[in-house]
Image (cartoon, rainbow, N blue to C red):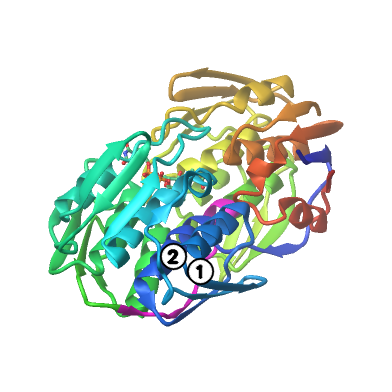
Amino acid sequence: MSRLLVTGRQKLSGETYVQGAKNSALPILAATILSKGENVIYNCPQLSDVEASLGILRYLGCEVKRSNRTLLINANGVCRSEIPHELMRKTRSSIVFLGAVLARTGRAKLSFPGGCEIGPRPIDLHLKALRELGAVIKEKHGYLDCSAPNGLIGAKVTLSFPSVGATEDIMIAACLAKGTTTIINAAREPEICDLADYLNACGAKIYGAGEGVIVIDGCDNLEGAHHTIIPDRIVAATLMACAAATGSQITLKGIISSHLASIIPVFEDAGCKIRCREGSMKFSAPSRLSSMRTVRTMPYPGFPTDAQAPMLAAACTAEGTSVFVENIFENRYRHISELVRMGANVKTEGRVAVIEGVPSLYGASVEATDLRGAAALVVAALGADGSSDINGVEYLERGYESLEVTLSELGAEIKKI
Ligand code: EPZ
């Protein structure tokens, strides 16, 4: 188990490029299964969750080559429709393979994705929608056994919640269905638009991605395409929180500022100065943040749940009281007990966390238990007095490409052991 050693209170400075978006890469990799011919995917981040998806693609019969952040994927050789448990359990988001394998092969057998550290991860919305597209799905012994003997049939599907994964699963499956599929109350995240852009480049006919209603006209087959993955807005928010917690000025390159529209005002309310121009952001934080007042996580375009943990960590040393309300996942405050061990004054009650800002945190030996909680501990350690020892770095590596390298290049005293 690798660990991070951080000596706090180092100012950050300079500029860094923001990596490609994990939550865009994962559904796009699954969607390559639909295509015939070669796909070239650029700006794909080097993450353990991506590696897990590439392992599933290879197991299914795809040819996968990687050089740095460029992937060559050819799905002509897809010859399996079953994904074994040991491959499924590596990443929660592998459920998005269900729609892709079912649409390509007419069958799909995969184990239920594990719950994960942030709460039970139900897939009822995925299964209900795929059944409405004509899939026959049997759930037994922790496995899903799905078939679409006559192929999938386009339908009108209404989601009771704008689930990101369910929207992606349906969009992918509907591309090869007979007829038109309409998704009502679809998720509107930028990663949904990026997936639609990739699929349309393959010849799909998807309209309205990014809005609440998405229409997909099914077609017979898709060709491989070239696609560049959008920047990761959550990594950008995390780096902003690192600068905010250390009173630093940094420049982020390769961002799309419109994807950060609900994040930027929270930092500005807390006293940060932010200037975005042509894909880069100049971010400067005061020596001490003022209160973030109330931050509520919502589906896009609201404040993203994935940015809640790093943002809350920065709020621990702000002036006054900040209140966070986590509306998306049941259990996204698990890391807070570790922040309290570093001297934070945070009380949680269900979905609400109340943070009384303290002048400073102090370094401690802490344990990460999930991806964004690990990022929060890094943010807290960077601003703390003294040194911290962060366990559970493998969680961080699921979503952040060499975060410790990025931060040390910006001047932080941080190393992985
Ligand atoms: C995606 O997860 C992201 N993961 C998550 O990022 C992100 O937090 C989440 O969307 C919300 O934006 C990937 O894209 C790989 P949901 P997903 O379906 O698709 C409930 C990270 O840190 N729900 O929008 O699983 C669910 O329990 C990760 O990068 C059902 O009830 O999120 C949750 O409470 C964490 N039934 C809510 O909806 C379902 O069938 C949102 O889930 C599906 C979801």
* Magenta span of residues: 222-235
- Determine whether, in the image, residue 327 is placed left or right of residue 416: left
Along the line of sight, which residue is nearer the eye, 146 or 233?
A: 146
Q: Secondary structure at mark 1?
A: loop
Q: Nearest the camera: 52 or 318? A: 52
Image point (31%, 63%), residue name: 172
Which quadrant does ligand 1 occupy? top left
Q: Is residue 232 visible?
A: no
Q: Is residue 286 left or right of residue 126?
A: right
Is residue 163 found left or right of 49 in the rendered image? left
What residue lies at 28% left-to-right and 38% top-to-bottom? 139
Check disc 1 and report the residue beneath it: 229
Residue at the far front: name it: 79
**Residue 28 has which mark?**
2
Residue at figure coordinates x 26%, y 70% from the top left:
206
- For label 2, the SS is helix
At label 1, counting other C-alpha atoms closer than 10 Å, the crowd grade (few under 14, some 14-19, many 20 or more) is many
Q: How many marks?
A: 2
The crowding category of the residue bearing disc 2, from other C-alpha atoms within 10 Å (few below 14, some 14 to 19, many at least 20), is many
Out of 278 and 131, give the one closest to the viewer: 131
**Which residue is more in the foreground, 208 or 269?**
208
In the image, residue 238 lies in the stretch drawn in magenta: no
Q: Are marks 2 and 1 in contact (CB under 8 Å)?
A: yes
Q: CA distance from mark 2 to mark 1?
A: 9 Å
Residue 157 in the image: above or below residue 335 = below
